[in-house]
Amino acid sequence: MAQGYDRLAGRSLERLSALSDGIFAIAMTILVLELRVPVLDAVHAQKTLWSAGAISQEQAVLDALRGIAPRLVIYVMSFLTLGIFWLAQQSQLDGLATTTRRLTWIHLALLFAVTLMPFSTALLGEYIDLRLALVVYWLNLLLLGALLWSALRYARRQDVLGEAFTPELVAASERRIVVYQLLYVAAVMTAVVNTYLAIALLVLLQLNSVISPRLWPLNRAG
């Protein structure tokens, strides 16, 4: 009975892909909720925009926007991160000839890590100067990368990859995941000097991941 259930459960790639699209979409939408419009009592109390206080109002809003700039940077970084992992997971799902119950659960675990991204993003946005907040964010990246790598490795061992996934492509994909995880570690370690430096490096890494397939065709595997 259990063996029959294992053969049938979690075998629909279409439903798994649909679930993945929905969870990524929700997580990417939730990210923006941390970008709250600053409430400035002095501005709201001013009833006429063209009054003598208009210039001071504009300056107050500009100063407030500067204050949320770090959160905006972290939002962009996390949006890029989710976009990168969505593309990576969808590439794997599209390349599967079939799936198994265990492989489906690995992908579900990856989606669990995706749902944690809004929390780790909010934590880093609130405590951007604290290394612990950055470490929590990095652990989220590590979990995403480890599960993505595990899914590909398991699919290769179970021989459920389609013909499009050649051994060379699989090896390049696994290598790309590992290399980027090592680069994430190197970037986070610079937080010993300054957390802003570490965040800037993480943003650059994510931007590179987005544009690198065009600049370096050999890296298309990721």
Image (cartoon, rainbow, N blue to C red):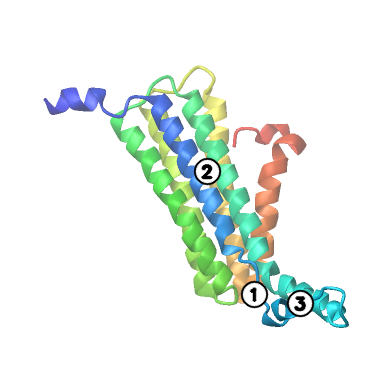
Q: How many residues crowd mark 3 within 10 Å: few (<14), some (14–19), many (20+)?
A: few
**Could you say whether the residue bearing mark 2 is in a helix, strand or loop?**
helix
Lateral position of residue 57 relative to residue 91, left or right = right
What residue does disc 3 label? 47
Residue type highlighted by circle 3: Lys
Q: Picture coordinates of residue 48 (x, y %)?
A: 81, 75
Extreme front residue here? 47
Residue type highlighted by circle 2: Ala
Lateral position of residue 38 relative to residue 95, left or right = right
Lateral position of residue 56 relative to residue 39, left or right = right
For discs 1 and 2, the disc positioned in front in the rendered view: 1
Residue type highlighted by circle 1: Val
Q: How many residues crowd mark 2 within 10 Å: few (<14), some (14–19), many (20+)?
A: some
What residue does disc 2 label? 25
For discs 3 and 1, the disc positioned in front in the rendered view: 3
Q: CA distance from mark 1 to mark 2?
A: 28 Å
- Asked if marks 1 and 2 touch (Cβ < 8 Å), the reply is no
Q: Picture coordinates of residue 153 (x, y %)?
A: 42, 35
**Could you say whether the residue bearing mark 1 is in a helix, strand or loop?**
loop
